[in-house]
Every structure is written in structure tokens, then in C-alpha cells.
């Protein structure tokens, strides 16, 4: 029964299960609906006036701040949404449901692919919402259909890769509460030590050195290039490579940690 | 149908299974009896492919559990002590999902779910989320989930622990029905009464090993057996009461002046109660309470291991 068709069938079952969860507890969508809307509006209206001018001066090309920061908010939201997989998985692992799945003649990895595929759907929703809200307050993605589609594809790939990091973290860390703390302590600073809201040139050298090389900055820069139809950063290859690299490590690691945790 | 040979499993310094052997014949119910921490749950987890033993071997429905866990999974149904259900799904959705994961086609899964909801008296609650279910309803749905694919072998881990008497009786009816339908059942329990009532055979386990095996009757004979126990209103008459009891039963009567109890081992029920009351009355003894008392799990344990079940339990906890 370990056929590809069986795996697909079971993964779909798991996606359906996750979608019913979302239907019954819509709060599960707050992190991909309400919070990105808040971020777009907050950064645009609260900080936009003050830091927008500085960004324009340092970025070379004159841009409205909203056009600069959208890439940052897209990638930040998707990173959080992806890594949040860990909390949902840890929740499942604490209850008996995973034992039930493990006693069934189903594809065992489908529990995880179902989880990460659901997150892909969540990421799509987040992007759509941010896109619309952004455009309402002045975001002008002039990168054309191909450019914007490529940007969305890159963001989804990044989100999918981080979902698998979330799987590994969820299988490793015992409680959902502990994970919330870890996410806040690790992912939050990473999203800020990046080109998300200001160009890295304004940071101290040592920090800029790190910020310029970490994957979130590379993905943000590439999304920025693609959505705005400019070519300032030329990060396409390194951003994609990072995503593929993260996925190539996190996917087998997540599977292995999950199997180890559940066969105890 | 189920066979375990020399199963060992340790968690750190705790030896959950220390050479467990047992088997269950097709269509029979085996009751696995033992205190908390005796290794019952670990044994079930090994046989249901959830835990890999350190050594030993096991087969379920003729399939090697360690070599072909996937094939074993399509032959078994599992219902646990902690009902493994999705709280946010309705009863019907839970059964449907589990049926489809057993690779039943959607129509069959739906029909089977309807059947089980009807049979387990969950029709009215079928479209409510499991979150709103009582403990007894969860257990019934959990058992339903185990039966979705009509597996030939079913494992029940303490199916009635924590249920009220009404819920317990309902579960007993359902479990009894399974075996009558030809299903092989391995059931763990802490209650002798439960094993007594449902199981064809009982295996008593302690510290990860089987320490006794037999029918309920055989085990009881091995243990002290049944006692006739009375409570009288005036402790001065205990001596007279003891003489009456000794004439009816076997060996010496056990007397406790503090609680005004007297008891005696008896080998049969035939007319014992009526004779006891008549003769106690003739001897001028005023009886407050009288009845047969079956050996409890504590007494089974005391007889088999020389220490009470409670103590066995706390020993396990200290080791863990």
C-alpha cells in the first residue's frame, strides 16, 4: 500500500482534516489574515512617513516605502505561518490522534505532507490578502505577470521549506508552548535583521554582513526585484538555492525526527 | 491469532516488558490483567506496531509485527485508554476519515460509519463535534473507529477505565458482541470483574512478565477463592458466628472485632446463604450484612506475587 497514489490519497485526507479544523476554529487563520493586514497598515502609515524618506535616499532608486516594505512583510508573514506548523504538529503529538494514525494501514508520512500542504494553502491566502490590502494603500507591483508569478512561486517555495523546518521542530520539541517561545526568540529577530523594513546599508557593518547573507534577506530582495520589475539585488539564484537547500535538509530530517518520536 | 514470544522493552532503567510470552486463539477474548505499570499498555503498543520491542517476536493474524507492520495494520483495530479521536471533527467525520484511511472507498466508509453509529447508539450525536461528547460516548466512538474496517483482530487498552457503571455495562455488551461475531480480542484491564465477565482466558502480568494464565475460574481457585462474609451487630457474638461459619465453609473463619466482620472460604454457593442465615439466627446472632465476596485484583496479586497490587504499582513508580 506504499504506492504513490496511496500517499496522495492519504495526504489529501489529512488536508481535509486540517481544513475542517480551520472551519471549526477560524482563529487558526488569524496569523495569515488579520496580522498581515495589521502589519501592512502599521508599517505603511506609522513608519512609512519617517523611514520612507531614508529608504528612498539609500536604495538608489526612488520608491514609495510601501513598494519597498511589501516584500519584507510578505516574507515575514510566510515565515511565521510556515514555522507555525510546528505548534500544530506538537499539538497533535500531545494527543492520541497520532497513535491512531500510526495504527492504520495508511502512508505515515501523509500526516506530515498533509500538514505542510495545508500550510501552502494558508500561505496562498496570506499572500492574496496582503496583495489586496497593499494595493489599496499604494502598493504598485509593476513587475508584470511573469515577474509577479515568479515572486509568488518563490514565496510559496520558501513557505513550504519552512513548514518542513516546522515539522522537524514540532517533532523535536515536547510542548506547543515551548515552541511558541522558541519561534518568538529565533524567527522574530531573523525577520528584522534583514532587508525587510530598511536597507541593510543603514545597519552596523557586522550586522549588515549577516543580514545580507541570511536567506530571508535574499528571498525578500528577489521578491522585491520581481514584483517591482527592477533588477537591483540580482538574488534569484541564491534565494532559490537557499529554499531548495532548506527543503532538502528539513524534509528528510522532519520525517526522521517524526518517526523517531512516534515509534518510542 | 496473536502470539508474543519473549518480548523485552526498556525505557531507560525501567523494564516495561521483561520476557513477555502469551498467545490468543482465533475468535477468543484474552483479558490481560495487571496493575498500573505492569507493562500492559507497552505490550499492546508493541503488538499494534506503535512501539518496537528491544527483543522478542510477535505475530498478529499470522503476520510478523516487526517485519511487516504495514500489513499488520490492515488486520487490526485499536481502541485505547485515551480515546484517539479528533475533537474538532464530528463523530461521523471521524469514522469516515478513519474508514477512508483504511482504504475503504468513500461509499463503503459512509455506510459502515452509519451502521456503527446506529449500533453504538451515537446516532443523535453523530453530527456534533467529539469535543461535546461524554466519556462513555468517546469510548464507544473510539471502539467504532477500531471496527471500521471489520478487522479480524481488535486490541482494547483498558476500555472501561474511568467510565461510570452505566457506560461500563454498555461497553461490556459491545465487547461481548465482538467475540460472538468471531473477532479475536486482546483486552487489558485493571478489573478482575471485567476480565471475569468478558474474557475466555486471562493472563496476569506483573513487572513485564506473565505470571499466571488460565480461565477466570482457574485463577480464582489458584487464589484464595470466594468467601462468605458477614457483619454482625454485636461483637460479643463473633465467636458464635465463627463457629457457625466454620461448619459451613472450609478452614478457619477470619474474625475482626473492630469492624464486627467474620468470613470463611467457601467452595460453592449451593444453599450456603440460606443455611448461614438460618443457623446464625438459631445461634442468636444478629446479622447486619451478609454476602459472597469474590477475590479482588488485590487478592489475586497477593496470592500470585506475595504483595498487594497497590504496592506493585508504587514499586513501578519508584523505578520509573
Image: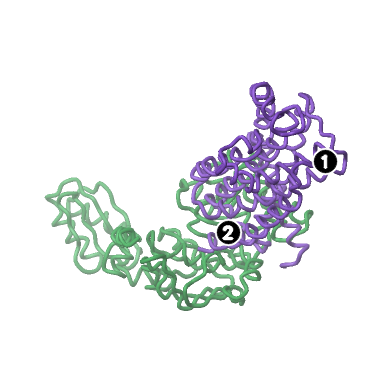
Chain at tag 2? A
Picture coordinates of residue A135 (x, y %)? 79, 28
Picture coordinates of residue A125 (x, y %)? 74, 38
User: Chain in green?
Assistant: B
Splitting the image into 4 quarters, where does residue A79 fall? top right
Label 2 residue SS = helix
Q: Is residue A97 visible?
A: yes
Mark 1 sits on what residue? A148
Q: Residues within 10 Å of mark 1 (few under 14, many from 20)?
A: many
Of tags 1 and 2, the one toward the viewer is 1
Q: Is residue A111 visible?
A: no
- Among numbered discs 1 and 2, the one appearing first in the sequence: 1
Splitting the image into 4 quarters, where does residue B184 fall? bottom right
Label 1 residue SS = helix
Q: Which mark is residue A176?
A: none
The residue lying toward the viewer, choosing from B312 and A82, is A82
Picture coordinates of residue B270 (x, y %)? 35, 64
Residue at horizontal 51 percent and vertical 44 percent from the top? A182
Mark 2 sits on what residue? A258
The residue lying toward the viewer, choosing from A23 and B239, is A23
Question: Which color has been applied to chain A in this rendered view?
Answer: purple
Amino acid at each position: 500500500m506504499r504506492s504513490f497514489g496511496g500517499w496522495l490519497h492519504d495526504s489529501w485526507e489529512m488536508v481535509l482534516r486540517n481544513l475542517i479544523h480551520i472551519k471549526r476554529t477560524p482563529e487558526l487563520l488569524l496569523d495569515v489574515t488579520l496580522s498581515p493586514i495589521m502589519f501592512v497598515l502599521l508599517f505603511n502609515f506609522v513608519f512609512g512617513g519617517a523611514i520612507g524618506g531614508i529608504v528612498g535616499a539609500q536604495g538608489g532608486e526612488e520608491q514609495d516605502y510601501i513598494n519597498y516594505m511589501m516584500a519584507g512583510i510578505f516574507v515575514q508573514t510566510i515565515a511565521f505561518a510556515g514555522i507555525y506548523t510546528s505548534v500544530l504538529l506538537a499539538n497533535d503529538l500531545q494527543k492520541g490522534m497520532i497513535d491512531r494514525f500510526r495504527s492504520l494501514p495508511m502512508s505515515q508520512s501523509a500526516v506530515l505532507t498533509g500538514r505542510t500542504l495545508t500550510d501552502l494553502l494558508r500561505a496562498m491566502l496570506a499572500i492574496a490578502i496582503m496583495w489586496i490590502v497593499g494595493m489599496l494603500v499604494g502598493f504598485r507591483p509593476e513587475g508584470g505577470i511573469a515577474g509577479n508569478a515568479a515572486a509568488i512561486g518563490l514565496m510559496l517555495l520558501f513557505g513550504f521549506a519552512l513548514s518542513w523546518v516546522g515539522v522537524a521542530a514540532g517533532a523535536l520539541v515536547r510542548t506547543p508552548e515551548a515552541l511558541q517561545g522558541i519561534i518568538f526568540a529565533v524567527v522574530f529577530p531573523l525577520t528584522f535583521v534583514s532587508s525587510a523594513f530598511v536597507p541593510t546599508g543603514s545597519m552596523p557593518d557586522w550586522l549588515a554582513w549577516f543580514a545580507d547573507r541570511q536567506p530571508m534577506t535574499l528571498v525578500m530582495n528577489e521578491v522585491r526585484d520581481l514584483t517591482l520589475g527592477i533588477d537591483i539585488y540580482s538574488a534569484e539564484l541564491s534565494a532559490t538555492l537557499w529554499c531548495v537547500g532548506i527543503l532538502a535538509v528539513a524534509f528528510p530530517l522532519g520525517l526522521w525526527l517524526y518517526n523517531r518520536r512516534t515509534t518510542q | 491469532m496473536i502470539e508474543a514470544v519473549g518480548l523485552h522493552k526498556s525505557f531507560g532503567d525501567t523494564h516495561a516488558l521483561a520476557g513477555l510470552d502469551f498467545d490468543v486463539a482465533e475468535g477468543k477474548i484474552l483479558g490481560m490483567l495487571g496493575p498500573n505499570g505492569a507493562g500492559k499498555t507497552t505490550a499492546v503498543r508493541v503488538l499494534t506496531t506503535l512501539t518496537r520491542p528491544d527483543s522478542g517476536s510477535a505475530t498478529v493474524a499470522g503476520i510478523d509485527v516487526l517485519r511487516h507492520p504495514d500489513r499488520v495494520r490492515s488486520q487490526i483495530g485499536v481502541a485505547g485508554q485515551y480515546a484517539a479521536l479528533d475533537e474538532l471533527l464530528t463523530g461521523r467525520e471521524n469514522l469516515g476519515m478513519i474508514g477512508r484511511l483504511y482504504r475503504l472507498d468513500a461509499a463503503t466508509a459512509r455506510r459502515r460509519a452509519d451502521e456503527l453509529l446506529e449500533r453504538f447508539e451515537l446516532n443523535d450525536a453523530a453530527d456534533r463535534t467529539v469535543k461535546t461528547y461524554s466519556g462513555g460516548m468517546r469510548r464507544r466512538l473510539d471502539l467504532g473507529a477500531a471496527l471500521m474496517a471489520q478487522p479480524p483482530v481488535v486490541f482494547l487498552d483498558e476500555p472501561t477505565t474511568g467510565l461510570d457503571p452505566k457506560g461500563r455495562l454498555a461497553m461490556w455488551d459491545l465487547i461481548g458482541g465482538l467475540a460472538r461475531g468471531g473477532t479475536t480480542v486482546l483486552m487489558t484491564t485493571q478489573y478482575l470483574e471485567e476480565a471475569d465477565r468478558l474474557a475466555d482466558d486471562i493472563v496476569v502480568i506483573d513487572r513485564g512478565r506473565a505470571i499466571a494464565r488460565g480461565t477466570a475460574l482457574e485463577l480464582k481457585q489458584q487464589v484464595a477463592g470466594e468467601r462468605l462474609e458477614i457483619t454482625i451487630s454485636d461483637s460479643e457474638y463473633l465467636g458464635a458466628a465463627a463457629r457457625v461459619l466454620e461448619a459451613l465453609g472450609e478452614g478457619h473463619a477470619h474474625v475482626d472485632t473492630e469492624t464486627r466482620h467474620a468470613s470463611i472460604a467457601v467452595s460453592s454457593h449451593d444453599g450456603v446463604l440460606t443455611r448461614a442465615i438460618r443457623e446464625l439466627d438459631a445461634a442468636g446472632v444478629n446479622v447486619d450484612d451478609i454476602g459472597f465476596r469474590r477475590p479482588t485484583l488485590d487478592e489475586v496479586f497477593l496470592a500470585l506475587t506475595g504483595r498487594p497490587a497497590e504496592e506493585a504499582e508504587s514499586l513501578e513508580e519508584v523505578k520509573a
